[in-house]
Image: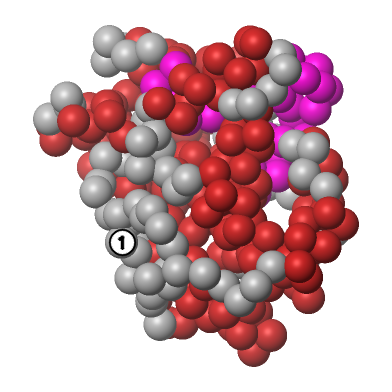
Amino acid sequence: MPKALLPADLLTFNQILITGGTKALYSAIAAKGYGYANWAGGVAYNMGMPTTASADYLRGTALLALASPIFRILRPAQVDKLRLDIAKSYLRLLQRIMRSGESAQIDRDITLDELCGLYLEGLERNGLSVENWNLHFPLMILKRRSGTAALQAFWSFLRDSRRRPVHVGTMANLAVIAFIYRQSASEDIKCRQMAGAWLSRNPTIYSSDAVEKRFCAALNVLRPAAPADLAAFLKLLDLDVGAAQERIANQPSWPPQTRSIAPVSAPGLADAGDNCISDRTSAAVYEALIRRLTAQ
């Protein structure tokens, strides 16, 4: 459970943002146990960068960040302002939550509706549409297919992905991209259009076949250390675990990739951080996944 935040804490966080910037702000709030701050740190640190640290990339920054074409038209100073405005929107949201409660404190993470409002506010302050946020279309497709009840479970899993070992974030990332590719061939024209719009904004994403193969391989590697809620997350996306595992069994040896995104260097275990690798079993899973995902 997150530690309760008091009005004095919000004043401290505001000062941290002024003096230390967005990365320091998210680190300070994440240290109190708030999953969104931990998750958002990946955006603040990696937003707009042509490459990212492997550990952060594999935790799902392709989903955390904004669509890549945006950074062809934004200057570095504009990207920095966007980072700052999203962080300020988060602090304003925390202030609103505190004022609306019966007690002058906060002891919960933000909801999905609050998340969407936060990003909408931050993007619009910079003349950008919410459609430039990489989670917008996946959320809209999932809502259309499964209703609003599925969205909070989806968000809860993603929000906490950076607290988990790196390979869990990788699985979530690949699963969502596989979901988008499948929806690009949906019989529902609205889902098909939204999936196509997402793919058009992310021209460096792996091809559909490559994503499916990586999804299956990641699932195979993850099985010994899979969290209990992974199956429920995949079910939300209509990704059949049994079918995927059967596909793995029928596949030939791992093929070379035919289309790649920006190269990602494989880090040593020390680069991943103590929170990512907690024991030798996790280390072996992580190393195997790195080798598969970075195979040339």
Quadrant (top left, top right, bottom left, bottom right) of the C terminus: bottom left
Q: Residue at x 34, y 64 (%)?
A: 264
Q: Residue at x 87, y 57 (%)?
A: 242
- Residue type, numbered disc 1: Pro
Q: Is residue 54 visible?
A: yes
Q: Nearer the viewer, residue 249 or 271?
A: 249
Q: Is residue 113 visible?
A: no
Q: Main secondary structure of the magenta part?
A: helix
Q: Position of residue 86 (x, y in %)?
A: 38, 27
Range covered by the magenta-colored residues = 131-160
Q: Position of residue 273 (x, y in %)?
A: 47, 73
Q: Which residue is mark 1?
A: 263
Q: Position of residue 262 (x, y in %)?
A: 30, 54
Asked if 59 appears above or below 220 in the picture, the reply is: above
Q: Is residue 201 left or right of residue 139?
A: left
Q: Residue at x 83, y 48 (%)?
A: 240
